Structure formats: structure tokens, C-alpha cells
Amino acid sequence: MRRELIDELLGVLGPAGVIHEPTRLLAYECDGLALLRQRPALVLLPRTTDECSRAMRILHREKIPVVGRGAGTGLSGGATPVEGGVLVGFGRMRDVLEVNVADRYARVQAGVVNVDLTLAVEKHGLFYAPDPSSQAACTIGGNVGENSGGPHCFKHGATTRHILGLVIVRDDGSVLDLALPQADPLGYDLVGLFVGSEGMFGLATEITVALVPTPPVTETFLAIFTDLDSACDAVSDAIAAKLEPSALEILDRLTIQAVEASVFAAGYPREAEAVLLIEAEGTEVEVEATLAPMKAIAQKRGAIDMRRARSAAERKKLWAGRKGAFGAMGRIAPDLYVADVVVPRTKLRELVAESTRIAREKRLKLANVFHAGDGNLHPNISYDRRDPDEVKRVLAASDEIMKVVVAAGGSLTGEHGVGLEKQEFMSLVFNDDDLRAMCRVREAWDPEGRMNPGKLIPVHACREMRGTEKPR
Amino acid sequence: MSALDTLEQRLARLGGPVELARPRFDVEPLPLVAPRSIEEVQELVRLAARDSLRILPVGSGSKLGWCGTPGHVDFLLSTRNLMRVVSHVADDGTITVEAGMTMEELSRRCRGGGHFLTPDVPLRAGKTIGGVVSAGESGYDRLRFGPVRHHVLGTRTVLSNGLATRSGGQLVKNVTGFDLHRLYCGAHGSLGVVVEVSLRLFPEAEHELRMTARTTELTEALALARKALALPARIVSLSIERTASGCELAARLFGLRSVVESERAMLEGLWPRSSVLEGAAAREAAESAAARQRGTSSLRPKLHVSCLPSRLDAVLPLLARCLAEVAPNSTFSVQPGIAEIDVELTSGLEDAQALASFTRSLRATLSKHQASVALRDAPRAALVELDPFGSSAEGLGLMRAIQQRLDPFGVFATGRFHGGL
């Protein structure tokens, strides 16, 4: 990066806002997908929308590619830098700008950490519903980019249902102010379109989020199973019976053992083949009306025990185990490949079994911890990235799992995004015409294709769209 | 095909019988073709692109009055004959249907699988799912379930090049690809023809009831509504209907019997002189109230006002005062939980110029409370220099760029949506 350009950016962002020293840049060379690395030419850390806008104008003039990054917890390589490109981080934009209790929304800067938002509003009897497992680190801006999920999205819906407005800095540095919450969009739904666009339309710098009233009663149960299939069947039965708990999460034996051996130990029974974490919320009557049939289904499907969290502390511990599961797997092997696919909820048992078979055939250690209620599987493969043969087998297993899932009516990703990891598999789900329509919309946002280039859409799809397509 | 073929003959060859229909009640009729398959839709769009014809996509046409008068249009393309169920996985809570299925039929099928269809819009027999999605029409049940755009899992849409493209999918959770279906939802057909819709479904009610209470003053009704909204109850819809004789407050509850009964007890504590309808009677009363409140069966001009819930206390008296001055017999209803107000304008605003002037003045008055005012079913003459959707939207340039990229040949009618899109 040219010195005079660095100096110009330093003039806009100050010394705390520009990282250019090679050793410090190392920390930004990958996100949670550590298999793919690229050192950015520069990292910018704006403090405000205005700073971000001014910096983006300079990058636009210089035609430099830009990758946005929240906390870097994404698992699909969405925040992997591009060669010669600049990475814009939001670690200095951590202010909650407004909490409107009467209208139940908050306006925050993009770098606010997910859990900090709930902590900031809980005194008002409100919370922010999307709760990714990485919520202690991930940012609201990153959640917007990926349309993140989390255990309680089963009841409350993923990020997109909770985003009421955005302030977006576009590729040329112009600011699009869509922050005011509207019941229905004025014109096209740019906010809905932007959520989940993986940083390819612009940078969200301020976000207006919906807040949800804290329920009067929350009950958490742990159903213990002697086989994983039965736990899956219990969830499929619950969906078919139209039950509406707030979360239905499954952890298998390998995950339980990793969690119990870690600082996240939650008291899960080590001898169980699977546990089903069930939570219901609402009034006392509502919770009882939801949990009674849910417990009956679990028992019918062979649950050998049902343990109720007797206090808020116990409930917190059960969830700490679930949310710490990915971290706990560091005990199994140095690296973890977290797959993320979605299946119809009628096919949970079948596709969990298929994933297990595929991993076994490739001599890999696979652990399951997943959002069963949404059909969002996470077959997690433990491996050592220093072993090239094992890396090859991990990637082959991931490919095969995606193909099997899509063939069964599933999809590539439920919450982690496509990024670099799944880009070439997009053609399993969408044909070239579908992908070209996406390219066209992207072109409207970012005509030069400088925002997070080379992600999500397979390269061939956008290359082929050039030229006229008028039917003859 | 002969060069002497009329447009009607060419349309009929590709899409079946052609009839005449008005794109608005006060403009000349145009040819309308209702293709019987998605392939026929594609052929008709290709014809339009090739011959530089302009299409106005419609479902059953029930919401054309929400939009402005289109610029040039050569023919209307209705999806009403696309009625296939593509997939209904009741045990996964999802359904995918072609766009022409009526909301009545779709609702019936969902009930057959034990599900409730949201949006619960009034006059379902005369509306198609494609039309509802394209217009972004939410039901009053959005208080509990949210707007329609939150429940569209994916769409198949015929774009201006005649290609039927997919976005999203049929799963309740899915972040694969850009959510273009969010663009098509509410775009009023200005970007393409939505031909297939996938929806998330919700459990059918085991028990349902509708509680009503009367007040003489609007402020009293609003206060009672606020108290109800503060309850830990999942109220489906909550409305205040203001008539000449006072205000009627109505809450719709449904779900598991024990839950509904507990919510009823909570509400009765707040509304001591309330009356209650149960089961089918409750549903029918809710439907007929929604139809009446939205004025969907009349051709009189209507206003749809939207603001933040906390601004209702300021917006409502201003609105009432403005109406009292020029159209004192107008009726209106309020949904306090979602802060929407529907007004049916009666005598006093028959003159188009007066209607346009009143709407402008109301928008200016309410703009300080960040309220938006849409004018529906207005005569063409009132819309000459008035955007029916309100003042210009932020990001209009970007919206035009999106429209230009998706419809570079101008196949779909413009000039009807926000800012002339």
C-alpha cells in the first residue's frame, strides 16, 4: 500500500483507525474459516459512519477492493480479505445510539457485540432475540451481513426478522440512510435485501433492531436419549404436532463429552448418546401447554430422563454448555470444521445419519450439535490442519454432506453464509439464470464489484451475464 | 404468425383467451391474458421483450388502486390461472404454490394440514397469493405474526428476459444467496411476475375468540388498547373502529385452548364490560370487521397512515381534526399495536383537486411525527402530481438502478409505484 495513501487515510481515521504494520495485519488474515487465509493490505477501523464514508470515498477513488468484518467469527470465509484489498472492521463502532422502549427498538453501531445489546436493554424488560452461539463475540453488523441465526430463532426468527433499519455506506462512500423503522418499506425493501448479502452490497454502519419483551416465564428441560436417531425423531414429531417451544437443540455424545471435559461443563450426562435441550417461554399457562406435550413426545421416543433447570443459574449453565460446544471441541483436535446445512425437518434422522456415515467412511471425527427445531444441522469435523491428507478428507466430507443434503431438499447454509466456503456449491441450489439475477442486483449496488469481491456467487455466473440478453 | 395478427391474437396464441379489463376503474380497458402455465407466462414476457410491449402483471386485480396510474401499458398479464400446489409438507410447516391460488383456497389447504395461513387478509376469495405478496399486503394479524414479507421463504419470478428465476427456497431457515424475494415482495410487479411462492405456516388455532368493548371517546379506547398490549398475551389483532356513535375496541385471540382462556381472563380484567364471540362466529366477525375497516369492498378513496406506535397519541387527534374539517363523515380504524390507521373518505372530497390538496396538506401535517400517508383508490385526476405512496423514498436512485438492471428493456409497466418506479 502506498505511503501517501496510508497517510491520507490516517488523516481521516487517526492512528487508532489504520493498521498497516505487517505483524498486526496478521490477526485479520482469516475469519472463523481458518483454512483460508489472505493478509489484507490495510485494516481500517472507523469510529463513525462519517469516518467510514470518508475513507470509502478514498478507496473508491483508488479502486481498491473492500471487505467488511465484524468480529471475524463467521465460519464461511465471508470476511477473508482479498489480495491487495482493504479490510474495514467495526471494532471501534460499539455504541448503542438509542433505546426506544415505547416502540421497542434500538439503534446501534455495527460493532456492538450481540450479547451487549441484550445486556443494555434488559433493564427495560426487553431483549434482542437472535442469539448466535458466538453471541459473546459476534457483532450486530456481522449478524446483518450473514443473516445470523441462533437457538432461539426457532421461535423468534433469524436476524432479518429483527432488522428495522440500516445506515449503509456504499462502495463510493455515499451514505444510504434507511434507519427510520417503517411498518412497510417505502419503495423496494432495501433493508430486507441487504440483510444476508454478505458484505457485497455495502457496509452497514448503524442498525435499527427490534426488541422483544422478556417473557414472564422461561422453562428449560434436558431430555436424555440413548440414541441420536430417537432425539431427531422427537424433534420431527414435535414439529409435526405444531408445538411451539422457543428452542430445540440437539447435542450428540461426542459433543457432550467435549463440553463436559471443558470449562463449559453443564452437567450433561456423559453416558447419553444425545440430549435434547428444550426451552419454552411465555406465560405460565403457555409454557405448561407447550412443555407437557413436548415431554410426552420425548418420552414416547425413548427419552430415559427429563431434567428441568430449577433455577436461572442452572438454565444459564445448560445454555453455556450448548453455546460453548464449538469451543469445547478444541479438546478433540486442534481444528474444527463447522459445517452448516439445512434440511426439511421431516428428514432430520436420515440426514444426521448420512453425515455420520460420510465422516466415518472418510475416517474423520464428527460431532453433532445443532438447531434441530429449524432443521439446521452442524456436523462438526475435528481435524488437524497441519495434516494435508486429513484436510483433504475434511473438505471431501463437507462436499459430500452438502450434496446429500441438497438432493434431499435441503440447502447449503442456514446461518453461516456462503462466503468462499460454499461458493462453488451454489450451482447445486440455483441455476445460472438465478445467479445472474443476483449478479444484476449486486451490480446496482456496487457497479465496480469492489465490495467483498469473489464471494458467494460462483465466478462464472457473473462473467457470463455481460452483454445483452434480450430474447429473440 | 402473420404480421397482420392483432395483439389480442398473438396473446391468445401464447396464453389462452383474451378479455378486456381496466387496470384502474377510471381508465380505458386493455387486453388481459391469463396464462395457464409458468411456461406460458415466460412466452408472453418474451413476446413483450421482443416486440417492445409493456406488461402490467396482476393477480386478481384487487389492489391496483393502491398504485398510481401506469405509464404506457399494452396488456395485463394475470396469474390467476396458475393454481397448482407445488409442494405441501405439512409436517415441516411449509407450502409452495403457484401465484394464482386464491387466499381462500390456500387457507383451506393450510387448514387441512393443521395450519393457519398468515397474512390473514380480508376478502380472501377475491385475492391471489401472488397479488398479496407482490403488493406486500399484510393482515391485521401482523401484530402477532409480523408482516407478510417475513413469511415468504422463497419465490419463483419471471424476469423481463422471460427466465423464471428462483430466490430463497422452501425451508424455514435458509441464508443461501441474496434474498431477492424480499425485493419482489411489495414491488407491485414492477420487477417481474411472481409465479410461485413458498410460505412458512403456523399452527391452526385449537380455540379462537374475539372480545369487544365500547367507549365513547377515542382516547379512552386507545388507553384500553395500550393496557391490553402491555399484557403478556400473544394477541393476534387489536383494533379500534371509530364510527359516528363511538369506538369499538376488538381483540382477537387464538391458539391452545388453555392459553386463549388465560388471555381472555387477563383482558376481561382490563375491559370489564366486554362481550365475547367464540369459534367460527369470532372468525367471521373478525373477517367482516377487517373488510369493513380496510374498506376493501368500496371504491371510495382511502388513506393508509402508518407511524411508530408511540406517535399515535399525536397523530390520531391531528388526523381526526383534518378529517373533521373537510370530510366529517369519514370513518377510520386504528391498529394500535402496529400503528396503522385506515380511513375511508366519504363526502366532502369528491373533487379530485380537493382530494389531492387534502392529501398533500395531511402529509405535511403528519410528517413532523414521521407518519407516512398512502392514498388508495383515488381517481386518476387526483394523482397527476401526487405519489399515492407518499413522499419520495430514501434510496430511490438505487431502486431505479435495481429496476433498470432487472428490467433493462422496460417490459414491466412503470410509473405506478413509489417515485414512479
Image: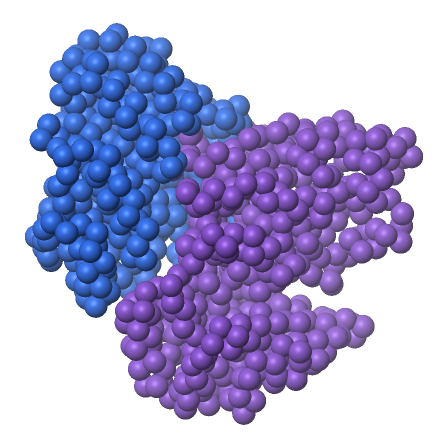
Chain colours: A purple, B blue
Q: Is residue B375 above or below residue A292?
A: above
A43 left or right of A421 in image: right
For the point 33% across and 14% down, the residue is B361
A221 left or right of B292 in image: right
Q: Is residue A209 visible?
A: yes
For the point 35% across and 10% down, the residue is B385
A262 left or right of A114 in image: right
Horizontal and vertical percent position of residue A287: 33, 70
Q: Is residue A330 above or below residue A162?
A: below
Horizontal and vertical percent position of residue B266: 23, 58
Viewer-nearest residue: B12 or B168: B168
Horizontal and vertical percent position of residue B239: 22, 41
Horizontal and vertical percent position of residue A73: 66, 58
Q: Is residue A410 visible?
A: no
| Total numbered circles | 0
Q: Quadrant of residue A261?
A: bottom right
For the point 38% across and 28% down, the residue is B371
